[in-house]
Image (cartoon, rainbow, N blue to C red):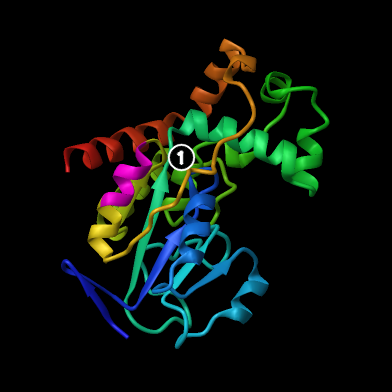
Amino acid sequence: MEVKNRGCVYDKLVFIHLAKTAGGTLKNEIARQDNINPVFIYGEDSWQNYSSVDHNVIYGHPSKWLFGNIGKQLPNIEGKVVYITFLRNPILRTISHYYHLRNVDKGIIGDRIREFPDINVFFKECYHWEFENYFCRILSNDKKVTSNRDMEAKFLAAIDIVRKDIAFVGFQEFFEYSLYYLNGMFGLKLSPEKNINMGSYSLLDVYPETFEIIKGLNFYDIKLYNMMLSDFLAG
């Protein structure tokens, strides 16, 4: 069923849950809403729960189902698809994501991170692609998200796609302000009690040289973030 709100016409809203950008907070709030019927995609098996009749929101981490498809019609999804996402300062997002994987992830990535005594040794001696220009990799629609080649091209593609093909970009640092605009644009009533996307770590444990490494790894993400935040605050 087509929905219209303040000029936004859509059949399905897709919330792109970029890691550590307040997505967990939004996920919990969306699940709580009576007028939203979401399906949460956190693995390929999740699609078996999707119903084109019942679900009007598709919410999940970007993976094979989304790589290369942002702003496009999703395979096997009927009707007009509209995309939404949230961003966060790339340096702080990277640090938050590091601690999340270290403390929570029980797989290969978490195990590898835990081989190093702390964040400073890890960034000095190791690497994980999700810590380098993560936004540009995902939002560029380049299906080779783990590739480190042509990062400037990924940045240029990401900026073009975000500005043209994503209906709304919010910001973790301006969470309530973002929800104000998001609710108005889509006729939603999202009002979480708190932002749960806060870690127990201290930034004081991160050495200045580690900050510089992380800053260098996210050169293009910082450019993208600053441009989109400027657009948002000027809006």
Q: Is residue 74 above or below residue 109?
A: below
Magenta stretch prevailing secondary structure: helix
Residue at the image point whose x is 29% and y is 55% from the top:
182
Q: Is 194 on the left or on the right of 181, as rendered?
A: right
Asked if the magenta segment contains residue 175, the reply would be yes
Looking at the image, residue 57 lies above or below residue 125: below
- Residue 159: image x %, image y %? 32, 46
Residue extent of the magenta highlight: 174-180
Label 1 sits on residue: 151
Q: Which sits in the foreground, 27 or 17?
A: 27
**How far across and down, in percent of the image, does residue 174 sit?**
34, 38
Q: Position of residue 224 (x, y in %)?
A: 35, 38
Horizontal relation, residue 56 to residue 96: left or right: left
The one nearer the camera, 72 or 45, is 45
Pick the quarter of the image with the N terminus.
bottom left
Residue 58 lies in the magenta stretch = no
**In this figure, what is the number of numbered marks?**
1
Q: Residue at x 25, y 52 (%)?
A: 181
